[in-house]
Amino acid sequence: MRLNKTLKKLTMAAAAAMAFSSAFAADITGAGATFPYPIYAKWAEAYKKATGIGLNYQSIGSGGGIKQIKARTVDFGASDMPLKFEEMEANGLMQFPAIMGGVVPIVNLEGIKPGQLKMTPDVLANIYLGKITKWNAPEIAAVNPGVSLPAADITVVHRSDGSGTTFLWTDFLSKTNAGFKSTVGSGTAVKWPAGVGGKGNEGVAANVQRIKGAIGYVEYAYAKKNNMSHTQVKNRDGQFVQPDDETFKAAAAGADWTKTPGMAVVLTDQPGKASWPITGASFILMHKVQADAGKAKEVVKFFDWAYRNGGAMATELDYVAMPPAVITQVQGAWKAQLKDGSGKPVAP
């Protein structure tokens, strides 16, 4: 009798453990870009309340996300630098844009209010090249008449990890300054002539907050959340603009997602008087052939839900939701490219 009771308890415990394991297995995993982390976290919280399914997203930088999805250690990778078609094909990957936003310069200068300081692409490039080293340099003073600039050293802060935010920043500076293009170039990781590194948007923001006279670059939500002093930037049409969802939308307005293989659109230095010049999309990477079709379906369900329900949350954090026409294109790509091991489509 006692043995039967013991067996019954063990059976019940095993059933409970299996139920817990099954529920846990439904959660999806992703890793990569820090740029979209604030909105992915907000979406994940709302999605879990709506469906019971969680998202474990590691904000480790685009370079790390690309490595992890290639190694199949996560269900999806995230990168703010879209992979070229050849690299996707070589690794059996497909990609799609999830969200758009902006990268902003941030500074730690006493008495300077958020959005007060103006920067041109050439001034930013020469600061990051180590050619402009003082805050009261004539090049900075010339575009900031009436602003009291200290005779303090500039400390340059950049990313220390492989980063899509760095790609957007260096892509913009390479497009607008020939010296930067020939000396540093663009990429997720570059050889910086000057400065100190920080890991992730979090690390750059922390270093800028800690060091008087520092300048760095982060995704706008980090600057806004931490009440950091961002700067205006002069755009391609010669206008000094403030970063917000309207100027990010303006930069994305003319993008043609249909003509680029893998939807690999880069939105830096776009035309338009209202365009924020350092705008970009964040991309999701998945394997075309899925070893676990169930997990792949859950990833698709999550981003489909985010497209349909996450727009208002994106706007709250000053991101820009993908336009309906782009969402339709992404949904078509899911059906055409994501397959299980037998070749059947994963997406409904």
Image: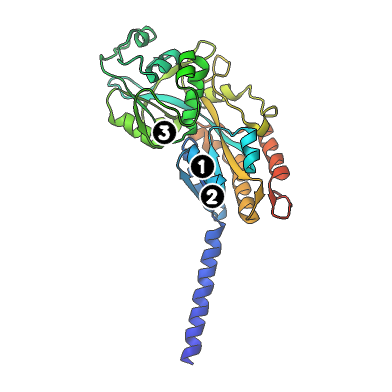
**Which residue is located at x 66 percent, y 39 percent?**
89
**Which residue type carries mark 3?**
Tyr
Question: Which residue carries the number 1 mark?
Answer: 65
Query: Between disc 1 and disc 2, whose residue precedes?
Result: 1
The answer to whether residue 322 is visible is yes
Residue tagged by mark 2?
A: 74
Percent x, y of residue 75: 57, 49
> Which of marks 3 and 2 precedes in the sequence?
2
- Which sits in the foreground, 277 or 69? 69
Q: Are marks 1 and 2 in contact (CB under 8 Å)?
A: yes
Q: Nearer the viewer, residue 171 or 257?
A: 171
- Inter-mark Cα distance, 1 to 2: 9 Å
Query: Mark 3 falls on what kind of element?
Result: helix
Residue highlighted by disc 3: 222
Q: Residue at x 52, y 43 (%)?
A: 67
The CA distance from mark 2 to mark 3 is 25 Å
Of the numbered discs 3 and 1, the one sitting upstream in the chain is 1
In the image, residue 13 above or below residue 252: below
Residue 244 visible in the snapshot: no
In percent of the image, x 58 and y 26: which residue is there? 266
Callout 1 amino acid: Gly
